[in-house]
Image: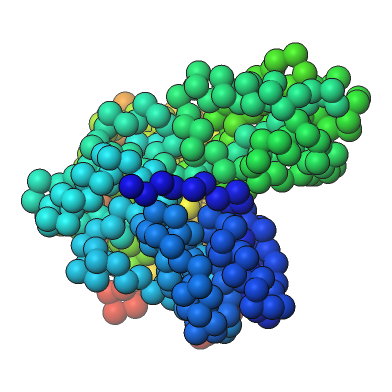
Amino acid sequence: MTTSQPRDSDGVVIALARAPHGLGGYLGFRSTSFAKFDDLIEALTEYRAVVVVAAYPIVVRALTKTLTSKYDDPTVIAIDEGGSFVTVLAGAHHGGEQLAVRIANFLGATPILTTASRVSDRIALDQAPLIKLDRVKAELQARLNHGVGLTIVNPTMLALPQSVLALEHQGPDPVKLVISDRVCDQELGDARGVLPTLTVGVGCSSDASCDEVRELIATTLEETGLDPAAVDRVATIERRVHHRALSDLHQEIVGFTPEQLDTVPIPTPSEVVHHSVGTRSVAEAAALLASGDKAELVVAKVKSQKVTVAVARRNRLRGSLTVVGIGPGSLDLLTLRALGALRSAQYLVGFKRYLELLEPVIERGQVVKPYAIGQETERVLESISLASDGNRVALVTSGDPAVYAMAQLVIERLPINLDVRIVPGVTAAYAASAATGAIVGHDHVMISLSDLLTPWSAIEARVEAAAQADFVIALYNPRSKQRTWQLEKALAIIGQYRRSTTPVLIASRVERPGASTSITTLEEFDIEVVDMETIVIVGASTTAFNQGYLYTPRGYQGAR
Ligand code: SAH
């Protein structure tokens, strides 16, 4: 029978010359250099995991003197002195390959993985971070080795490292592997891999004990369903880093100055804490600060007598919201950027008619959320909420997203923590102008005649100012079934400043089925042909025709 002798120490990075900077800290290992061969021998007998930076023959020679059995041997990773290759020389199945991959990722080196499941290009569950080797896992590995597929379930939308994503594998009867940091997610699949995502922030008084800290962390995690195995560091105020209450936890500890902590926006600031240590928050701020700029606070401050604890999560996949202008209608006026944004979205939200126009570019698997006319706020709120849940969302608008459309509303309603991207589009005025020449060829303004969101007095004042200043005037939303008199009123105002023979472009359904354009004059204008899908563009005093094209000269030739 073989018994397994527990080794005293966790891990060491030992280097012939110099360990790659920061590797020890990154792994949570001690870092040391060795002068004598005996130092290496000692490390190989003492530690559970040894990362050696040296020429491989030296390591192999040391191993021949120290290896005893598969069960007792440490995990031994060797890195060449150039830092190019990382390989596992012993203990591959104790998470050795996973460790090698982590180190290789850190160094930008190539991991050399040689165990059976790798060689046959089957899936090695060891590659997934931190799945403890247990019976379930061994069974799963056996199934995988028989060629079944593997699907990853990611219920909390974590940003999964490449080494985990690479486990996904098409095949019959796929194993469902849940990757998460919550115990309750176990039920969503056949096995669960724990991704280290959590930092526990701890604040404590000077007479707090490690037992109290440990107890509060344990109950907090238990009550919130978070997995203790997903916690890979503790964060606190600098002056507590070496306090026994924390150092006895045997976790990686990160400390911050009161000034650093005080820069972090947190939900429950405390003036009492500020008074005594110079920052309004220790636990919450430290947890967030140690988790980088995409952190989210998953447990706000919890207190026992002398200890406070908070938990932050990093690695959450952030959703994205792109407001995409699709142009006036025809798909060949969709920009490549807009097409890219549409293609990469999981959800497409927008007015039903525009989504119909997009049908040829919508791909299988994309979820379409059509809305009726109006409902702008609903569309925006649904897009924001889908994106906040970690999804990639495209909110579709016609023309340009900022021209009487939804980009502004999105920005107004944007929660912190969500990035938004606006993709411009060809607006109706430019498409209409181009269809008949270049009426917008000199200074022009866009005015919406809709008085639903703007008082008519303001619209009227702008129309008058534009007319007076001899701008080309593009009138959006000129007329609808409910708004019938505004257009006539606007044209009358413009008529006070322009000749009655001034050309006016009436363009309906530009670049859409049933498109029509007509050119008339201020005096001959027929209101009845104008509807919701029409844009009216009134020329300036210089607007003219040449060979049938309507244009406003810029003044290069025959400039007055
Ligand atoms: N964001 C859009 C405008 C939305 S406001 C853009 O940049 O084009 C809606 C108004 O735009 C309509 O009432 C109409 O006046 C004009 N419009 C939009 N698309 C049009 C089209 N294809 N043809 C004519 N007018 C259009």
Residue in the foreground of this view, choosing between 46 and 413: 46
- Please state the horizontal and vertical placement of residue 81, each as a whole percent of the image: 58, 82
- The reply to whether residue 89 is visible in this rendering is yes
Which residue is at 41% across, 46% downward? 3
- Please state the horizontal and vertical placement of residue 466, each as a whole percent of the image: 56, 51
Q: Is residue 335 above or below residue 392?
A: below
- The reply to whether residue 489 is visible in this rendering is no
Which residue is at 44% across, 36% downward? 181
Asked which quadrant contains residue 383, the reply is top left
- Please state the horizontal and vertical placement of residue 447, each as a whole percent of the image: 48, 46
How is the structure coloured here? rainbow
Q: Is residue 141 above or below residue 78?
A: above
Which residue is at 37% across, 26% downward? 184
Quarter placement of the C terminus: bottom right
Residue in the foreground of this view, choosing between 187 and 275: 187
Q: Furthest-left residue in view?
A: 172
Which residue is at 70% across, 67% downward? 32
Number of marks drawn: 0
Left or right of residue 301: residue 60:
left
- Please state the horizontal and vertical placement of residue 543, each as a whole percent of the image: 44, 67
Left or right of residue 257: residue 346:
left
Q: Furthest-front residue in view?
A: 1
Q: Furthest-right residue in view?
A: 275
Left or right of residue 46: residue 92:
left
Residue in the foreground of this view, choosing between 104 and 496: 104
Q: Is residue 550 above or below residue 143?
A: below
Residue in the foreground of this view, choosing between 397 and 145: 145
